[in-house]
Image (cartoon, rainbow, N blue to C red):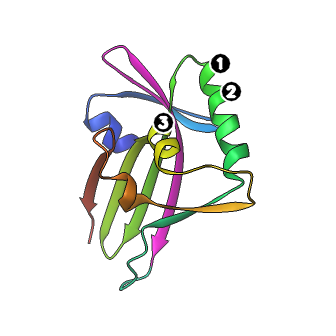
Amino acid sequence: MMYWLSKNGYECVLVRHVGIDIIASKNGERIGISVKSRSRKDGASNFSFTMTKPLEHIKKIKETCSSFACEEYFAFVLDQMGIIYGYLIPLSVIEKYYSVSAKSSQDWNIQKLTNDASTISFQLNWA
């Protein structure tokens, strides 16, 4: 994710702080990013990410981003069949499409979120 951000004009720092992994800035906008990644076997077509304790995780992201004065984002990275799919999605978009609850886990279908104009997606071929 940091490679793609840097190639697209963002200045990035790996923070590994509670709630977020990256802080990136571009054109005066600063974003705090929680990165989630998965590998899928060839032939699988599952673009769903299971979020464990989603409400608790989002609370941590919001608190940390408030401390660093940045907007809350998720980055989802999916490695499948020689292609790395990346999605950079504002937390506000996720909250718009999903009723985030206190359940122990919740499945988020990333393809559902890619239709929103605020979602940025990319692909890297590595095979």
Residue 69 in the image: x percent, y percent? 56, 16
In the picture, the disc for residue 67 is 1
Amino acid, disc 1: Ser
Amino acid, disc 2: Glu
Q: Which residues are magenta?
A: 23-40
Upstream in sequence: badge 3 or badge 2:
2
Residue corresponding to mark 3: 92
Residue 18 in view here: no
Residue placed farthest to the bottom in the image? 43
Residue 109 in view here: yes
Residue at 30% x, 72% y: name it: 82
Residue toward you, 64 or 105:
105
Q: Tell me whether the residue at label 1 lies in contact with that at label 2, contact meaning CB atoms closer than 8 angstroms.
A: yes
Residue 106 in the image: x percent, y percent? 63, 61
Q: Tell me whether the residue at label 1 lies in contact with that at label 3, contact meaning CB atoms closer than 8 angstroms.
A: no
Q: Find residue 21 and report its image quarter.
A: top right
Residue corresponding to mark 2: 63
